[in-house]
Image (tube, grey):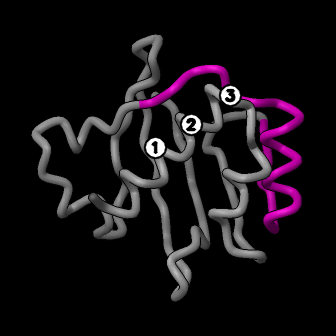
Amino acid sequence: MSRTSDHVDAFNHAVTTGDWDTFAQRFAQDASMTFVNVPAGPFHGRTAIAAAYRENPPTETMTLLDDEGGADEGLDAGGPVRFRWASGATGTMELSWAPNGAVQALTVAFD
């Protein structure tokens, strides 16, 4: 399983449990989270990212579209990865990783 798949699994767990503080621990201390064409953020630092999730929590789980065939070798290649919300809406996310495996930057765009 790729780091990206692990991240989505952790996100979906946070959606269903509301445990955004644990989810935010996946981010580097100095991480950034940016949304494209959405009036939210950007957020800088793990504390701000955790607060953003707590204050405006996502309510839908997501599925990676690039992983539908079960082969996810390319998910950590550094480019955007397509996803679908439970409602059917789609978008892309791009993750970069700190040397310790934490999320260094996350950029999300909605179609």
Do the CB atoms of the residues marked 1 and 3 lie less than 8 Å apart?
A: no
Is 87 inside the magenta-drawn segment?
A: no
Q: Amino acid at mark 3?
A: Pro
Magenta segment: 40-62
Can you identify the residue that label 1 sits on? 9
Are the residues flagged by discs 2 and 1 in contact, CB closer than 8 Å? yes
In the shown orientation, is residue 66 left or right of residue 69? right
Who is closer to the viewer here, 45 or 79?
45
Q: Which residue is mark 2?
A: 13
Instruction: Give above or below for 100 relative to 30.
Output: below
- The residue positioned 20% from the left and 62% from the top of the image is 74
As helix, strand or loop, the secondary structure at mark 3 comes to: loop
The earlier-in-sequence mark between 1 and 3 is 1
Task: Provide the residue designation for mark 3.
Answer: 58
> Circle 3: is it few (<14), some (14-19), or many (20+) Cα within 10 Å?
some
Q: Measuring 47% from the left and 11% from the top, which residue is drawn there?
A: 87
Q: Residues within 10 Å of mark 1 (few under 14, many from 20)?
A: some
